[in-house]
Image: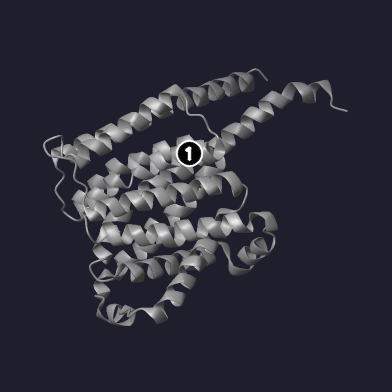
Amino acid sequence: MHTLTGILRQPEVHVRRHLCSSTIGWIALTVMILAGSTTASFGKQLTTYFSPLSMLFLSEVMLLLFAVISFGFFPIFKHLRRVRREIVLPLFTAGVLNGVLAPAFWFTGLTRTFAINSQLFGNAETLFLILFGILLMHQAPKRTQWFGGSVIFFGLLVVALHGFTERLSIANGDLLIVLAGALYGLGGVLIRKYLRHLEPQVIIVVRSCCAIAFFFLLSPFISHPFVTELQAFPWEFLGVLLGYGLISRFLLIFSYYESLEHLPLPTVSFMGTVTVGTGLLFAHWYLGESILWYQSAGAALIILGAVIVQWGNLRKLEGHVVHFLKSHHQH
């Protein structure tokens, strides 16, 4: 039987756990934003030397390697053996979407556009996350989320129309980036719906294994110069390759799955759009790409939309913090 003291302390314990979970989620989200800022720039530099299929293989091999080094082979293997039969199909589907199809389209698009454009149009994933969240998870967006999503869409439209100075024109590379965003969004919703209680490292390993298996299954049927590309790769860029694998892939994906586990899907999807600003600045600093005025305007609108949507959640979190501090100081 519960004691009176225990009953009275239950709200405080609940708030404490909620704050702890939210803190972990926000830390993971911050890491995701910083790591995501490097993805397009490092990837663009590496696509100079590797084809999209080679980039897919290399990125997932490095992702798998860093996951095994970080978590250990046998602990990961034990988690894999404990995966329930009913979630095997969603796990495999998410692995194919996020580990094979989406990266293949993204790398192909990256070879045909600028890193800044890929950073901007990559934010279409946010809209697809919300769209598939509505269709598959029946999550009804709030009024602020509708308004914020509209602002983000308007920001993408500003970039596509070059500041409304030209007709709607999206290059093939940009279109492939948008398609990759749709696939990433669908995979993210599947993870949120069916795999949210599964360890992130298990999802990472499965998606990497799907990509590696796809590479070896496809290689006998196509002429692919992977060995030649590897031999011609300038080793002074080895740091870029390792940085891409560790920061742009492992830290980004792990922190993404970790944030999905501790924060609501709309929070993760919309706050992830902050990378559009940090990614543009990193591409300008690292690659020397020019930032045009309509790209800056589009980035500002995308970030503004994220702030609008997140405003309600921030106020709610602030209320939990105030309540916790008051209850803490009363004892």
Q: Quadrant of the C terminus?
A: top right
| Residue 221 placement: quadrant | bottom left
Query: In the rendered view, does 320 fall on the left or right side of 153?
Result: right
Q: How many marks?
A: 1
User: Label 1: which residue?
Assistant: 26
Q: Quadrant of the N terminus?
A: top right
Is residue 244 something one can see in this rendering?
yes
Is residue 84 something one can see in this rendering?
no
Query: In the rendered view, does 204 fall on the left or right side of 170?
Result: right
> Which of the pair 37/268 is nearer the observer?
268
> Which of the pair 12/60 is nearer the observer?
60
Q: Decide: is 194 above or below 322.
A: below
Secondary structure, mark 1, is helix
At x 42%, y 47%, the residue is: 31
Residue 150 x/y as whole percent: 34, 30
Residue 200 x/y as whole percent: 55, 54
> Which of the pair 68/303 is nearer the observer?
303
Residue 301 x/y as whole percent: 27, 32
